[in-house]
Image (cartoon, grey):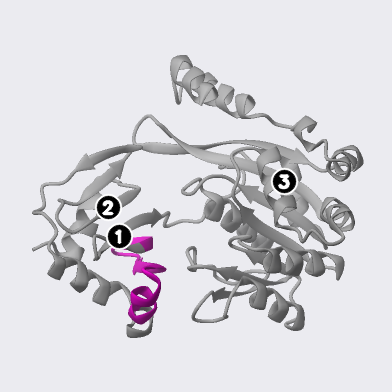
């Protein structure tokens, strides 16, 4: 029988970033970017059901059965915290546990450019953090919230699915709302935030047009919004947002989007030596020229302030990765 507590201990001991659990297979760990088998016995259906009971409430399990998938956060300081995606496969429950770093990193340790800090001090505007699943978007958003919390008085409302990093009030007052349990959805959470006297709104995912329209409304009414979106590059992220916009009054809505944007960071996490992982990214601060390019549809010609090559070159220079690894990363 596979016991959750023992599996989490093993993952913490090996500094695994992810745990894969599926009925009929032994559990696997992802360590330093590589998938590794464990010495545990194959997972039985009773094991997976028992794990569901431990990580979810009865209401959450009902939603999981209805939808065939569900996201939840689980853990504590002793076990470590995890974002868990549970899903059905072959009519049984499978799960991927993604470890959430225990400490919220600061923006300097992530190597973020100076303009990201400047955005954190802005009264209004939109900053997009984009990247693939598992690319560290939540981590960067948490670092931005932490910077605001340490440096200015603000009421911060986060809307997440699930809540990952837990913030403690410093100079700011922070409330964290989880989609499904605290609010119906991102769109509803944004509408509520406008009535809650928020200064800063953090959106864990721009998943639909309702969420994007809520973000534009929030910025236009004087709020700072930090939000995550998919996209491997800056232009991918902008194209994704434009495709979400309603076709009615499309040109007007593109102008609204361009006007609200203050910056875009497109990132991913790469494995480096000594069981460490590091962000690489490209980033652009939106000046008037960049905004005009978006309005005209020539956003593919945007020139980032910092390119992916720039951040990879720093890793090579600091001997965190080899020049050959750097070349492979750029090719990918």
Q: Relative to 281, is 10 on the left or the right?
A: left
**Dot 3 corresponds to which residue?**
238
**Dot 2 corresponds to which residue?**
20
Residue 44 lies in the magenta-colored region: no
What is the quadrant of the N terminus in the image? Answer: bottom left
**First reached walking from the N terminus: tag 3 or tag 1:** 1
Quadrant of residue 31 within the rendered picture:
top left
Nearer to me, 151 or 268:
268
**First reached walking from the N terminus: tag 1 or tag 2:** 2
Q: Residue 236 appears at what percent x and percent y?
A: 66, 41
Quadrant of residue 188 within the rendered picture:
bottom right
Give neighbour class at mark 1: few <14, some 14-19, many 20+ (Cα, 10 Å). many
Asked whether disc 3 touches disc 2, contact meaning CB atoms under 8 Å apart, the reply is no
Q: Residue 44 appears at what percent x and percent y?
A: 12, 63
Mark 3 vs mark 2, CA separation in Å: 32 Å
What segment carries the magenta color? 61-85
**Dot 1 corresponds to which residue?**
95
Mark 1 vs mark 2, CA separation in Å: 6 Å
């Amino acid at each position: 029988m596979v016991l959750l507590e023992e599996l989490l201990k093993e993952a913490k001991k090996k500094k695994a970033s992810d745990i894969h659990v599926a009925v009929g297979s032994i559990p696997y760990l992802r360590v330093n970017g590589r998938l590794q088998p464990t010495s545990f016995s194959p997972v039985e259906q009773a094991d997976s059901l028992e794990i569901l009971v431990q990580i979810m409430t009865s209401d959450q399990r009902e939603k999981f059965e209805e939808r065939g998938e569900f996201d939840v956060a689980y853990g504590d300081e002793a076990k470590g915290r995890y974002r868990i995606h549970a899903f059905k496969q072959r009519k049984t429950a499978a799960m991927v546990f993604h470890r959430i770093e225990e400490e919220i990193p600061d923006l300097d340790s992530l190597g973020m450019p100076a303009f990201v800090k400047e955005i954190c001090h802005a009264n209004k505007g939109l900053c997009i953090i984009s990247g693939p699943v598992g690319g560290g978007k939540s981590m960067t958003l948490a670092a931005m919230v932490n910077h605001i919390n340490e440096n200015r008085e603000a009421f911060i409302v986060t809307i997440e699915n699930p809540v990952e990093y837990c913030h403690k009030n410093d100079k700011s007052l922070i409330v964290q709302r989880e989609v499904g349990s605290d609010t119906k959805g991102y769109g509803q959470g944004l509408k509520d935030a406008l009535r809650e006297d928020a200064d800063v709104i953090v959106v864990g995912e721009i998943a639909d047009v309702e969420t994007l329209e809520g973000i534009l409304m929030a910025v236009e009414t004087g709020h700072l919004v930090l939000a995550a979106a998919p996209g491997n590059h800056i232009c991918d992220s902008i194209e994704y947002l434009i495709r979400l916009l309603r076709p009615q009054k499309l040109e007007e809505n593109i102008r609204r989007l361009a006007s609200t944007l203050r910056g875009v960071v497109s990132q991913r996490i790469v494995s480096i030596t000594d069981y460490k992982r590091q962000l690489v990214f490209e980033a652009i601060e939106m000046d008037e020229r960049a905004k005009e390019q978006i309005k005209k549809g020539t956003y593919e010609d945007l020139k980032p302030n910092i390119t992916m090559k720039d951040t990879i070159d720093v890793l090579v220079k600091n001997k965190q990765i080899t020049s050959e690894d750097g070349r492979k990363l750029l090719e990918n």
